[in-house]
């Protein structure tokens, strides 16, 4: 089991279940650094791949060399959006709905600041692959996360996040799409996420969404 520090007082532990290994050896600094020095022969491989692409091509169906891939799968990359769980903890106790809304937006935007130095694509999870982890929160409480690859073509990841002692639940699906546009590539992150505050709302079984 691997543990990595997220922020003061918070830590995340992860567990991955897969038939294919998506871990790389090396130090923590190596894992955090997504930049890569490209060798001449690697540049030739990229040139060969680009020469076969056509505008509008679906990049998810193109076999890419490992040196331009992240050493983790999309299931783990989704946890970038939960990298600041401390921003969620006070929301269920806020009485003003506007304050709750603004705080949820701040939490959502906090996940977008994590961007690797180089452009890299996460590994495609195999169908049925599962990734789970948990965060240690203040007051000896925890937040739990589990995700599964529920479709291969088109790729779709489903995930569930729960902080039971803080009345927070998130259910979501993510359908990443990427296309070659001729001189550039576009990456689209489609999907939906529902955040529920379990201590609020008229229906106690669903909470406020």
Image (cartoon, rainbow, N blue to C red):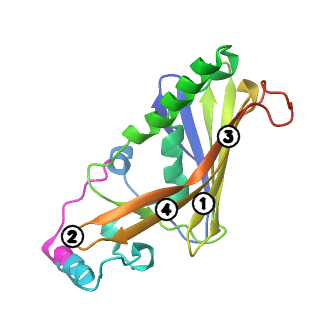
Q: With 198 as the anchor, is 17 left or right in this view? A: left
Residues under labels 1 and 3: Cα distance? 17 Å
Most prominent secondary structure in the magenta stretch? loop
Nearer the observer: mark 2 or 1; the answer is 2
Circle 2 residues within 10 Å: few <14, some 14–19, many ≥20: few
Nearer the observer: mark 1 or 3; the answer is 1
Q: Along the polypeptide, which appears first: circle 2 or circle 4? A: 4
Q: Contact (CB < 8 A) between labels 4 and 3?
A: no
Total marks in image: 4
Residue at the image position 36 percent from the left and 46 percent from the top: 32
Residue bearing the label numbered 1: 157
Circle 3 residues within 10 Å: few <14, some 14–19, many ≥20: some
Nearer the observer: mark 2 or 3; the answer is 2
Circle 1 residues within 10 Å: few <14, some 14–19, many ≥20: many
Which portion, as a residue range, is magenta?
Answer: 33-43
Residue bearing the label numbered 2: 183
Residue 35: in magenta span = yes
Residue at the image position 50 percent from the left and 59 percent from the top: 74
Q: Is there any visible trace of residue 169 in the rendered image?
A: yes
Q: Along the polypeptide, which appears first: circle 4 or circle 3? A: 3
Q: Contact (CB < 8 A) between labels 1 and 4?
A: yes
Nearer the observer: mark 1 or 4; the answer is 4
Q: Look at the picture and state if 201 lies above or below 172.
A: above
Residues under labels 2 and 1: Cα distance? 29 Å
Q: Along the polypeptide, which appears first: circle 1 or circle 3? A: 3
Residue bearing the label numbered 4: 176
Residue bearing the label numbered 3: 144
Residue 102: in magenta span = no
Residues under labels 2 and 3: Cα distance? 41 Å
Q: Look at the picture and state if 62 lies above or below 101.
A: below
């Amino acid at each position: 089991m691997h543990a990595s520090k997220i922020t003061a007082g918070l830590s995340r532990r992860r567990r991955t279940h897969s038939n294919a290994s998506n871990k790389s050896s090396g130090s923590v600094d190596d894992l955090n650094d997504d930049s890569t020095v490209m060798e001449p022969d690697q540049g030739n491989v990229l040139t060969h791949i680009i020469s076969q692409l056509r505008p509008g091509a679906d990049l998810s169906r193109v076999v890419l060399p490992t040196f331009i891939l992240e050493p983790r799968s999309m299931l783990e990359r989704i946890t970038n959006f939960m990298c600041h769980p401390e921003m969620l903890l006070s929301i269920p106790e806020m009485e003003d709905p506007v304050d709750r809304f603004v705080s949820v937006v701040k939490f959502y935007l906090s996940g977008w600041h994590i961007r690797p130095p180089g452009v890299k694509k996460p590994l495609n999870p195999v169908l049925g692959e599962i990734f789970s982890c948990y965060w240690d929160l203040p007051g000896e409480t925890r937040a739990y996360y589990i995700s599964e690859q529920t479709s291969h073509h088109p790729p779709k990841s489903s995930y569930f996040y729960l902080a039971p002692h803080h009345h927070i639940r998130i259910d979501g699906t993510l359908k990443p799409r990427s296309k070659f546009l001729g001189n550039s590539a576009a990456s689209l992150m489609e999907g939906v996420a529902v955040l529920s505050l379990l201590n609020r709302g008229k229906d106690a079984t669903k909470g406020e969404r």
